[in-house]
Amino acid sequence: MHADSETLATLPAAPVSQLAFRDAMSSLAAAVNVITTDGPGGRAGFTATAVCSVTDQPPTLLVCINRSASVYETFIENGLLCVNTLGNGQQDLSNLFGGKRSQQERFDGGQWESGVTGAPILNSAKLALDCKVTQSVSVGTHDILFCQVLDIRHQGESDALVYFARQYHHLPGAAPAA
């Protein structure tokens, strides 16, 4: 469905402010993920909540990355990544990868192994999605990386770590069957 010119003419002329948009986005609960890569560009990682499924044919997800991030070039050069979804009690690791620490200090905060792509997989991740980047689209300050999932590792029914209203929260895992 396409909007007609009359409808478009009635839209607000002023864009939504950056602050208003960020405040609105803080009302969306999101899983907390550590995104990792390793390859010719080096080893790097960052914390992200901007991760979303796209399609299951082929299994594809998206990850958003700021082009001004210190790790941006590393991810682009490597062309692969792992989405490591964190569970309850892993807030410190999220903060470590979301802060200004060196990459070495970030990776020292967990136990890692290499996935099928070579990307670092966090041994204690609730879920690990090992991917190759198949496409990149630039929007504003960010690139949207479309990633085909090549391998999945799941830790079972552990609690999930989510970020909502600018705070960490946990969601309990599935209750055991009676």
Image (spheres, rainbow, N blue to C red):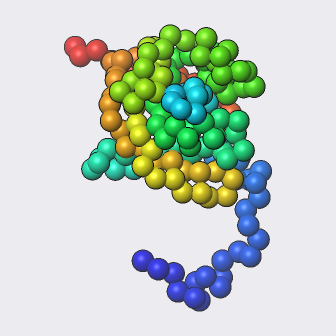
Q: Position of residue 79 (x, y in %)?
A: 49, 41
Q: Is residue 175 left or right of residue 85?
A: left
**Can you name the residue that lies furthest to the front here?**
40
Q: Is residue 6 visible?
A: yes
The number of numbered discs placed on residues in the rendered structure image is 0
Residue 172 x, y percent position in the rendering? 44, 20
Picture residue at 41% right of the left edge, 40% below the top: 132
Please identify the residue farthest to the left as the structure is shown: 178
Q: Is residue 61 left or right of residue 111?
A: left
Vertically, is 150 above or below 173? below
Q: Observer-nearest residue: 103 or 1?
A: 103
Please provide percent x and percent y for residue 74. Answer: 60, 36
Evaluate whether residue 36 shows in this view.
no
Instruction: Specify the quadrant that holds the N terminus.
Output: bottom left
Q: From the viewer's perspective, tell me whether residue 148 is left or right of residue 166.
A: left
User: Which image quarter is the C terminus in?
Assistant: top left
> In the shown orientation, is residue 114 left or right of residue 35?
left
**Is residue 168 placed above or below 28 in the rendered structure?**
above
Instruction: Tell me which corner region of the image, top left, top right, bottom left or bottom right, holds residue 153.
Output: top left
At 70% from the left and 36% from the top, the residue drawn is 70
The location of residue 144, given as percent across then percent down, is 54, 50
Answer with the quarter of the image where residue 139 lies.
Answer: bottom right
Q: Residue at x 65, y 35 (%)?
A: 71
